Amino acid sequence: MPMLSVNGVDLHVHQQGRDHEPAIVFIHPPLLTSENFNYQMASLSDEFHTIAFDLRGHGFSGSSDQTFSYALLAEDIRQLLDKLDIEKAYLCGYSTGTTVAIEAMLANPDRYYGGILISGMAEVDDWINKSRIRLAALLSNQLTRGLLARAIAYGNSDMAITYSNLLKGARQTDTRTVREYYRTSLIHKNISRAAQLELPQLLVYGEKDKCFRNYAHQLHQTLPDSHLFFIKNVSHQLPTKAPRKLNSLIRHWIRLCQEDWQDQRPLRRADIANEMGDQLFERVLREQEEQFL
């Protein structure tokens, strides 16, 4: 079990494709762990250095007495990159993990190539998701945490082995940390600051994820350089329930980002972004051989 001492806490870290560049760091939401990204780690490590870790207090990572905040998690990620001797990486956040990814990129933009934001938001501002998060925070206690863990693991599972792996990590998670993670997501405000984030962003949502559709368009309109995709016939849990299409998007988008668009010809930033979006769509369609993602 690979453990690294980072920012005063022991983090459980998985790496694959260490000989490849660039690196992708995956960030999970409350109660889930690095296990949530097993399909991405397996599929993308043939071309990229993939890194998934349990956030402090989650899974097999250690907990600490430090006050929980997204700024603390952002610093954990920065120091993790230092520990792994990685100068720059892409950040990939899922659900609430996207808010952490945005915070990390705002705090240290020079350390990141860009972000992959899956089923995410910059801040929670609708009553449905606020109610869900408040309920999850209330259930984050010693008596009912097991029920919450089973519900979260089941909702993100595509098969029995996935459920078993996710539940195993959730049962190891520190109850106080999970509760603070949920509570922080209710009060953290990032949308106005996100407008300052000039790094390229890939936004991916499920077509059936109605509660996050507004967040998809909000982020797309706010972020200066972003590409928005909806995957058909799936809701929120894209890493485990639509991995083939999600991984294809990530692979082709990073390839395009790594190309030197600025030097190809004198286009405005908006023109470059539009052309990149068109080429990404065409490449993914050719690979998937489907009319829609």
Image (cartoon, rainbow, N blue to C red):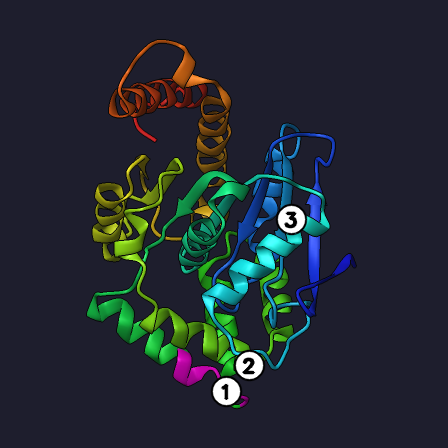
Can I make out residue 286 in this image?
no
Q: Residue at x 54, y 77 (%)?
A: 177
Q: Residues within 10 Å of mark 3 (few under 14, many from 20)?
A: some
Residue 17 place in picture, x, y as percent: 70, 35
- The amino acid type, in three-letter code, at marker 3 is Leu
Which residue does the numbered mark 3 point to in the structure image? 81
Closer to us: 135 or 93? 93
Tell me which label, 3 or 1, sits earlier in the chain: 3
Q: Residue at x 40, y 56 (%)?
A: 95
Amino acid type indicated by mark 1: Asn
Q: Quadrant of residue 56?
A: bottom right
Q: Quadrant of residue 199?
A: top left
The Cα atoms of the two marked residues, 2 and 3, are separated by 27 Å
First-in-chain label (1 vs 2)? 1
Q: Which residue is mark 2?
A: 175
Tag 3's secondary structure?
helix
Q: Which residues are magenta?
A: 137-142
Determine the secondary structure under disc 2: helix
**Which quadrant of the view contains residue 19?**
top right
Circle 3 or circle 1, nearest the eye: 3
Q: Are marks 1 and 2 in contact (CB under 8 Å)?
A: yes
Looking at marks 2 and 3 on the same chain, the residue that comes earlier in the sequence is marked by 3
The answer to whether residue 23 is left or right of residue 135 is right
How would you rate the neighbour count of disc 1 (Cα within 10 Å): few for under 14, some for 14-19, many for 20 or more? some
* Residue at image coords 63%, 60%: 165
Q: CA distance from mark 1 to mark 2?
A: 6 Å
Where residue 179 appears, as percent x and y from the top left, is: 47, 79
Q: Which residue is tagged 1?
A: 141
